[in-house]
Amino acid sequence: MFHLILYEPEIPPNTGNVIRLCANTGVALHLVEPLGFDLEERKLRRAGLDYREFASVTTYASLEECLLRLGRPRVFALSTRGVTRHDTPNYEPGDAFLLGPETRGLPTEVLDALPSEQRLRLPMRDGSRSLNLANTAAIIVYEAWRQLDFNGGA
């Protein structure tokens, strides 16, 4: 359905929560190295509650390799530096959502490589810094799936 790409994720419980999200929504998870943890780490397993066996999780040495292997999907990056509200685009099956590392976000060159309408921002109150990575992933996945009328959901 959709692809969720975590670029250099750092915090195991966040990735564990995203694995659980992907297992429950049918979204494929792609992890771009380096990872800030081992995929077998206990904190990751606890947060994912052993959902990994129900999720499609693939790791890549680089973002370029990931996008190439996915067939160059339409990519939407989520960032506090995004300019388009997350519910504005019309999402399609096969779209990819890209989130950066928790402590620094996506590199400027990655964001700048995308058209402004594909650089997304979640609404927040003035003065807020950012949302948690797993929360951001859940918001965008469910918005995109909602647009497809939750096709395949129970």
Image (cartoon, rainbow, N blue to C red):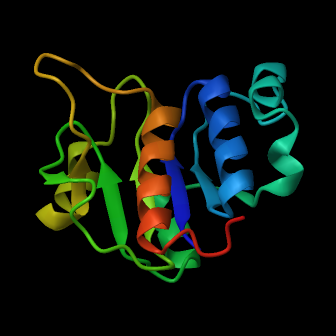
x%, y% of residue 84?
A: 15, 55
Of residues 61 and 115, the one nearer the viewer is 115
Q: Is residue 35 left or right of residue 124?
A: right
Give the farthest residue toward the top. 127
Q: Relative to 59, say whether 94 is above or below.
A: below
Q: Is residue 102 left or right of residue 125?
A: right
- Pick the quarter of the image with the N terminus: bottom right
Residue 115 appears in the figure: yes
Residue depicted at 75% across the width and 28% down the height: 44
Residue 60 appears in the figure: no
Which corner quadrant of the image does residue 98 belong to? bottom left
x%, y% of residue 57?
A: 73, 56
Of residues 69 and 150, the one nearer the viewer is 150
Of residues 143 and 8, the one nearer the viewer is 143
- Pick the quarter of the image with the C terminus: bottom right
x%, y% of residue 141?
A: 49, 55
Which corner quadrant of the image does residue 119 belong to? bottom left
Which corner quadrant of the image does residue 81 belong to? top left
